[in-house]
Image (spheres, grey):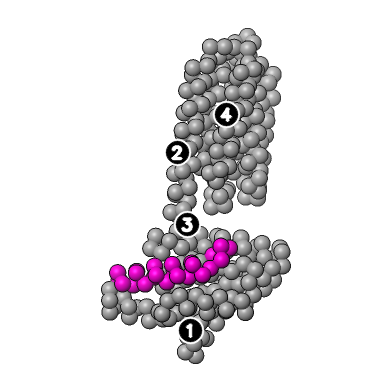
């Protein structure tokens, strides 16, 4: 979810702030004598306060904060449903439930989105069931069904979009942006844990000749065949990405330079076409760019010496 983390936090802050403002409008202009005005003033303050806090910390909040904020929103909707004075007031909370569900569906993994949507519907339904007004069962059931369908559709679409945005369309491996994002997280984790982390840059030898001699279709087939063979040899935790053209990169967690070089030799055995690889192990304080520069330098030393992997 990291790709849109700041956007997600900002959007959730907006949702809380708008909801808080609407609570204050409801408190200032109550629809019924039994409207819980005091509760609306309180929830308005909570909404604006949480919204302001999320706005202020949008750059730094952890993912768990977003989960907690979505769950809190579900609880607040349930309480408002319980204390609603009219059936219209209960059903009127439907857009809030749908908004929470769609937010979770777009920004959170599919299992988490389903869990949050289920909790929101359960909380809202429990509050509505315990409320004094009646006569809202039919529209409430329609609301629940619509929310379930919308959340499921949005969650599946969001997952497909995230996959497409982070995948190289030709080879199916991570594209440059997605690879750098995930590799940076691995680098930060290795710095915290003190575990070895190695990177490799792979550059195909004489790839231009393949395109010139056999056509770009043959070159594309070669790239697909190479990456498919490499992927079969890599561990689940290893991250392969296409950096551009015929250059690929590897992020190898819990792997020192010797083990990384051994792995490159195994990858070379998967296909007869030759390529050259350079390896570098992260040092304390390294940025991703710095460790990739060292791997690239080793790659070109090997090319000049006539070595491949």
- The answer to whether the residue labelled 1 contacts the one labelled 2, judged by CB atoms less than 8 Å apart, is no
The 10 Å Cα crowd at callout 4, few under 14, some 14 to 19, many 20 or more, is many
The 10 Å Cα crowd at callout 3, few under 14, some 14 to 19, many 20 or more, is some
With 116 as the anchor, is 160 left or right in this view? left
Residue holding disc 2: 153
- The answer to whether the residue labelled 4 contacts the one labelled 2, judged by CB atoms less than 8 Å apart, is no
Residue pictured at 59% horizontal, 36% vertical: 116
Foreground residue among 6 and 159: 159
Q: Which of the 4 image quadrants contains residue 127? A: top right
- The answer to whether the residue labelled 4 contacts the one labelled 1, judged by CB atoms less than 8 Å apart, is no
**Against 135, is 264 above or below?**
below
Residue pictured at 39% horizontal, 70% vertical: 225
Q: What range is drawn magenta here?
A: 216-239
Q: Nearer the viewer, mark 3 or mark 2?
A: 2
What secondary structure is found at the residue carrying circle 3? loop
Residue holding disc 4: 121
Of the numbered discs in the image, which one, if any, rests on residue 308?
1
Give the mark nearer the N terminus: 4 vs 2.
Answer: 4
What secondary structure is found at the residue carrying circle 1? loop
Q: CA distance from mark 1 to mark 3?
A: 29 Å
Q: Which of the 4 image quadrants contains residue 19? A: top right
């Amino acid at each position: 979810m990291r790709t849109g983390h700041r956007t997600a936090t900002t959007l959730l802050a907006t949702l809380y702030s708008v909801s808080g403002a609407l609570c204050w409008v409801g408190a200032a202009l109550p629809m019924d004598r039994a409207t819980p005005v005091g509760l609306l003033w309180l929830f308005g303050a909570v909404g604006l306060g949480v919204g302001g806090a999320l706005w202020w910390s949008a750059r730094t909040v952890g993912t768990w904060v977003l989960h907690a904020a979505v769950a809190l929103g579900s609880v607040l909707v349930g309480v408002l449903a319980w204390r609603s004075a009219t059936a219209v007031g209960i059903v009127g909370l439907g857009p809030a439930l749908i908004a929470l569900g769609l937010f979770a569906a777009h920004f959170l993994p599919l299992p988490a989105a389903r869990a949050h949507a289920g909790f929101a519907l359960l909380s809202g339904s429990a509050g509505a069931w315990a409320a004094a007004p009646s006569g809202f069962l039919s529209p409430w059931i329609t609301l629940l069904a619509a929310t379930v369908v919308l959340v499921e559709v949005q969650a599946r679409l969001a997952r497909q979009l995230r996959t497409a945005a982070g995948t190289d369309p030709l080879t199916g491996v991570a594209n440059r942006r997605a690879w750098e994002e995930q590799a940076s997280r691995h680098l930060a984790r290795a710095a915290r844990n003190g575990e070895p982390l190695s990177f490799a840059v792979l550059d195909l030898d004489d790839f231009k000749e393949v395109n010139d001699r056999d056509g770009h279709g043959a070159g594309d087939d070669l790239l697909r065949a190479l990456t498919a063979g490499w992927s079969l040899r890599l561990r689940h935790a290893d991250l392969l990405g296409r950096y551009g053209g015929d250059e690929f990169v590897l992020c190898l967690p819990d792997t020192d330079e010797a083990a990384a070089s051994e792995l490159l030799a195994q990858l070379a055995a998967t296909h007869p076409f030759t390529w050259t690889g350079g390896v570098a192990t992260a040092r304390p304080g390294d940025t991703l760019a710095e460790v990739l520069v060292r791997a690239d330098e080793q790659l070109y030393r090997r090319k000049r010496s006539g070595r491949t992997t």
